[in-house]
Amino acid sequence: MMSADKDKAAEEKPAAEKPATKEAETAPPAPKNTKSEPKETETAPPAPKDTKSEPKETETAKPAPKDTKSEPKETETAKPAPKDAKPEPKETKPVAKETKPAAKTDEPELPAFEKGISDKLVEKFGDKVAVKFVKKDRVGIAASRDNVHDVAEFVRDGLGYDHVESVSGVDYPQDKEIEVVYHIGSYTDPSLARQILVLSTRAQREESPIPGNDATKLPSLRDVFYSVEFHEREVFEMLGVYFEGHPDNRRLQRTLR
Amino acid sequence: MTAELPPGLALQKVDERIMTLNVGPQHPGSGHMRLIVQIDGDYIVACDPDPGYVHRGEEKMAEYRNYILNIPHLERPVIHDSCNVLYPYVLGVEELLGIEVTERAKYVRVIASELNRCIYTMYWLAIYGIFLGHSTMFMWPAGDRELLIDLMEKMTGARVTHAHFVPGGVRNDLPANFEDVCLRQVNYFEKRIREYADIFYDNPILISRTRDTGVLSRQDAIRLGTTGSVLRASGVDYDLRKKEPYDVYDELDFHTNVLKEGDSYARSKIPWLDMLESCNIIRQALQKMPKSGSVRVKLKPNPKGKIGSVYKRVESGRGSLGCYIVSDGKPEPYRLKMSVGSFRNLIALPYLLKGEKLGNMPSVYWSLNYWPVEADR
């Protein structure tokens, strides 16, 4: 099944992807002479077009929607969201133990700084993102396939993250989904130096995949974070998730015919 | 054209001026990877790195072994830096299992990790030297590296693949008299590597070959998401030992080496400066380490991680090394992903080589502190 389209997927972009991969400003490697500006001006992949740049101010004080996944860490309790909390630098160790009367007695209180980050995202996107966990130095956000590009743009422009450390594909055969997890960090903002924002999204999983030519597709974040370029190619190679809008969407290793 | 030959084996003429040249995957100048270089005369117009030749499926293997059995094979991507490769995995498993490590074990880990960083860097420096045609720079680091390898052998029992870090501490306590021997060796080692400045880093031939080649600006280093020495040679002060201190790094006094030039020379100098700083760290750690106490927390047999995910990262010899572990409550990880510095720095290679002379390719390539086996995992 992997070798079904080997001869054409080896060197070229898969044939069915013509509209998505339109002009890829310079073809394979990184452009050297566009030194100045990291942003490309190409438009987003077709899917998340609808919610472009609408700040969605309506749902402001909505608390973080609980994720349905049973994460033991999530303790989005009745605590009112301190959403405009200034990013106070670090020192956000989970303070001692909160003595709640109710069931969760041994859960530490959510770290305030990390909670501020997740609250900003929830304030901006409301129901479209789900907070998976908030723990020390790590904030986990899940977004749907349609919204992940917008969320990533906000993470870069609104929150100050600037590079992606890791893109991992996680296979969930029982859910018929493949999760792609971006670990996003920041070099430029000192208050975010130890923070990692874990942005995850899910693609449909095929029983008999034809890599690049089936429904396992996600919008590429390459135009938001340049650093995902090789990582997304690796996920395509390993798990067959095709990233629409990636300008150099080959498999990572070239195959000999 | 030569359609019947595999594309990797044929010299393809693209047009009148541009020629495609395959460097590797078995050419020693490229390590175990292939660089597909398009040259116009002597100048590189495009470079397409082709990693994956030594892919070992470490991440997939990890899904079939429990948290303890994963230790020996996960250090294989960089056997010279095996303690640092295991470090984020061990930290992650400790968080999943809810283990707190003893103070002495943390210090032993820091010492082992810094020794390993030096061992790796010496190996890298030897290769860097020989590919610039400087064979003394191959002999000296390869020889001086043995000082620290002997130390690691005393400490762990193995010369390179130590498998020394385990969830809950380290495998064995230090041997008797280790502190004295370590201090003596490290002092001598530091004296030795200071001499490298005379023969290598102040050498006008080296400077003329590496200065102003492959310049990576600060902005681009951030944008491309580079890490480690590549990032710090471009003027970004980011070292995880400082920024997100793990174990006892927050109790030690050291500084981060940052250079502003962003060229091959700066990239090759940062690891050497880091080694000098490592000697400083080791001496402090030897002094501050509790003289006795347990170095390993006893685990239950076949321990099960709690459900959830964890992402831990450390500063390895090649930059930030992260380990993302997804656990579904079984004794094995559900998914394990290593985010390695080599792979993250690889994206800079086509960017840096564009417009360089072909003869500068080795100096740019090896200055990225790139380890092909780690990048492939």
Image (cartoon, coloured by chain):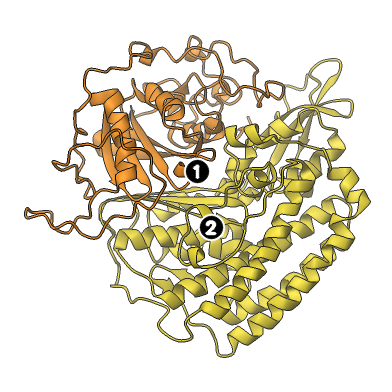
Chain colours: A orange, B yellow
Residue plotted at (29% across, 24% down):
A125
Res. A190 mark: 1
Residue bearing mark 2? B241
- In the rendered view, would you say B99 is above or below B7? below
**Chain assignment, label 1:** A
Question: Horizontal and vertical percent for residue B21?
Answer: 79, 31
Question: Horizontal and vertical percent for residue A72?
Answer: 21, 50
- Kind of residue at disc 2: Arg
- In the rendered view, would you say A46 is above or below B71? above
- Kind of residue at disc 1: Pro
Mark 2 surroundings within 10 Å by alpha-carbon count, few (fewer than 14), some (14 through 19), many (20 or more): many
For the C terminus of chain A, the quadrant is top right
Q: Quadrant of residue B99?
A: bottom left
Q: Quadrant of residue B105?
A: bottom left
Could you say which is closer to the camera, residue B308 or residue A156? A156
Helix, strand or loop at mark 2: helix
